[in-house]
Amino acid sequence: MAEPYPHTHTLMQAAARLRVAGHEWQAVAEALERSVDTCRHWPYDYPVVWRGYVLSAIDDALADYESEALLVCRANLRSTESRDRQRAAADLLRHARELRGTKRKVELSGPDGGAIQWAEFSIEELAKIANGDYSESEGGDCVPGD
């Protein structure tokens, strides 16, 4: 399997972060100043590399979510009116756990299956996954819920 050029690695890392954050391919292409077709083909042209970048982007997102939730929880320890912030922290932690589950599914899917799956999700499907609104298909894949 071909290896991307060094500069393409940098672009693919940025694309994976944007996709995990829920951006459509068009927005990814604009941000990277590349064509949509170029960006959209990276998961197919370099599935193993793409999978690694998707997993890394999920790890980064999880770390951000968990850190923010912990900050809110710590602030709530000193707050007299923390109901809304406690709910936000609980939601963020729940989201982090769900994203961790999605990451696990990508890890278990093999060298390219999960990465290709992430590439094929629409922005609406990615938003559903990001919000924890997904179901299990009979094959065990993470698929967006109805």
Image (cartoon, helix red, strand yellow):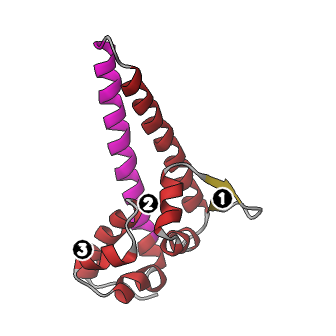
At which x and y percent is residue 104? 56, 53
Say what amino acid the circle numbered 2 marks.
Leu
First in sequence: mark 3 vs mark 2: 3
Lateral position of residue 87 relative to residue 13, left or right: right
Boundaries of the magenta span: 51-79
Q: In the image, what residue occupies the spot 48% across and 74% down?
A: 119
Q: Amino acid at mark 1?
A: Asp
Graded by Cα atoms within 10 Å as few (under 14), some (14 to 19) or many (20 or more), the crowding at tag 2 reads many
Q: Main secondary structure of the magenta part?
A: helix
Q: Please name the residue that numbered disc 2 is placed on.
A: 55
Q: Element type at marker 3?
A: helix
Task: Tell me where residue 9 sits by quadrant.
Answer: bottom left
Q: Nearer the viewer, mark 1 or mark 3?
A: 1
Camera sees residue 27: yes
Give the image location of residue 132, x and y in percent.
Answer: 55, 48
C-alpha gap between disc 3 and disc 2: 20 Å
Residue plotted at (49% across, 62% down): 126
Determine which residue is flagged by label 1: 146
The residue wearing badge 3 is 31
Q: Is residue 75 above or below residue 4?
A: above
